[in-house]
Image (tube, rainbow, N blue to C red):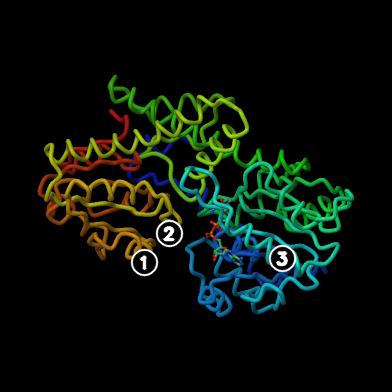
Amino acid sequence: MRSNATSGIGAIDIAGTQSRVTELSWLTRAENVAPSTGTSVCVIGGGFVGLVTAACLAQTGHSVVCVEKDAQRAADLSAGRIPIYEQSLPQLVRANLERDRLRFTTDLRQAVAGQDILVITVGTPSGADGRADLTALDTLISDLGPILAAGQIVTIKSTVPVGTAARVRRMLNPHDDGAEPIPVVSNPEFLREGTAVYDFFHPQRVVVGASCPDAADRVVQTYRAGLARPAPIVVTSNETAELIKYASNVYLATRLSFVNELSSVCDALAIDIGDVAYAMGLDPRIGAEYFDAGPGFGGSCLPKDLDAFISFSERNGAKLELAPAVKAANERQLERVLAKIRLAAGGSLAQQRIGILGLSFKAQTQDMRDSPAKSIIEMLLQQQALVQAYDPVAMDEARRVLPQITLCHRAEDVASGASVVAVMTEWPEFQLLDWRLVHDRMLRPVIVDARNHLSPETLQRAGFEYIGMGRR
Ligand code: NAD
């Protein structure tokens, strides 16, 4: 199928999404309840990864308790209130709460007692100097030390720098006799927000790193029981597993910075990036996925994992050229979007109304962590622009993290009195807006499409000036 970049407004690419929805609907039907496996799992951290992992492991047939230190969040989850927007997740959590296969608690000691496998999913955000901030992990390991029993397997699913599992192993097994009564397994997570439940049951690969083969095998079996189709399982050392996760994200970031930089070449030469990327992607060595020009990558993983990769590689003596350039190119891409908005607004942004469509870091999630939309809004505010924005699911999040902007009830409302409307997230519904209404409400009918998500022809026919990222 042709890339979104060149498809028309009427041709929304939802086929993939629809087949996933159909396929996931069997998960919650009573007759498809997997038999109990007899394995008990304690997931620690009820954030995005922890919640998806806990619900999917329960659906697999394991008995799961999820420990979340935030008492309000734990209470909400126990009552079946799901604080994140993720397809199929609410049904899965509620069904498994009802089956008593899943429960939430704040009590670590009680939750850990007697569990076969512990899965750590606490956050590892960027520290001030780009290093991964391991405070939550280290605090947790100190708490776990005195309460774990020999034979319990500790699995680190959080993204952690190379060497972290070995350090955790030494903390949990302090006797220097080579024995590993509490095995530590690295099990990096590759799910994508927006399709996380689907990804759990249909992974491209499962990576398990350990120095204890029995523990690795036990973790492999825990996942294998839930796979909807066979997947490659890579069993390796802890260090290799840790590096595979970072290397994968840095590679994805590199692809995006490449195609984004290519979009600036296309702008300079009046060539359409959609045609170039489409033809390039037909080569299986290149591939079409994750190859669309946009405002730069964001989200809770790529930027922080790129920073951490640069930091631990250089601290260990590796001299990097590419990864720092990928980061710099990403920052430049956002500046390109700002420059396009400023130019479209007539050269100055002060006191100009700018409409923003989309706030989450990508469609199908409410997650605004490191969202390009949030970054561009902060840049606009610095230049005294008046920002009015809309997102189909991230409005509560936006109220919290961007209290200075006006949030609109409907997408078309961002156009009221606006000099420019910018599309920052590729929500399918933005392709179906009432463009006549948008046109009539704007001061100047100019659209900056930072996601190359809309049809230039349709917008031009509707009387807009259309500005994309490397589009003719
Ligand atoms: P998150 O911040 O959404 O969730 C972490 C949760 O852990 C929070 O709810 C926090 O309250 C809880 N927590 C912290 N310390 C705790 C403790 N001692 N006991 C109980 N709960 C505790 O983070 P996330 O997005 O779920 O990411 C978790 C990890 O997974 C990170 O290392 C991230 O890099 C990695 N990861 C994330 C994704 C993603 O798409 N979000 C994908 C792959 C990997």
Residue name at image x 70 percent, y 42 percent: 241
Identify residue type, mark 1: Asp
Determine which residue is flagged by label 2. Answer: 366
Determine which residue is flagged by label 3. Answer: 144
Residue name at image x 63 percent, y 42 percent: 245
Q: Which callout, 2 or 3, points at the residue further toward the start of the chain?
A: 3
CA gap between label 2 and label 3 equals: 32 Å
Looking at this view, is 165 or 464 the one in front?
165
Q: Which circle, 1 or 3, is nearer the viewer?
A: 3
Left or right of 117, for residue 193: left
Left or right of 216, for residue 251: left
Q: Secondary structure at mark 3?
A: helix
Name above or below for residue 23 compared with residue 232: below
In terms of image quadrants, where is residue 2?
A: top left
Circles 2, 3 touching at the beta carbon (< 8 Å): no
Identify residue type, mark 3: Leu
Name above or below for residue 170 compared with residue 37: above
Few, some or many C-alpha atoms within 10 Å of disc 2 (few <14, some 14-19, many ≥20)?
A: many
CA gap between label 1 and label 2 equals: 9 Å
| Count of residue discs | 3
Few, some or many C-alpha atoms within 10 Å of disc 3 (few <14, some 14-19, many ≥20)?
A: some
Residue 132 image position (x, y, % from top left): 55, 47
Looking at this view, is 373 or 36 the one in front?
373
Identify residue type, mark 2: Gln
Determine which residue is flagged by label 1. Answer: 396
Residue name at image x 63 percent, y 69 percent: 28
Circles 1, 2 touching at the beta carbon (< 8 Å): yes
Q: Secondary structure at mark 1?
A: helix
Q: Which callout, 1 or 2, points at the residue further toward the start of the chain?
A: 2
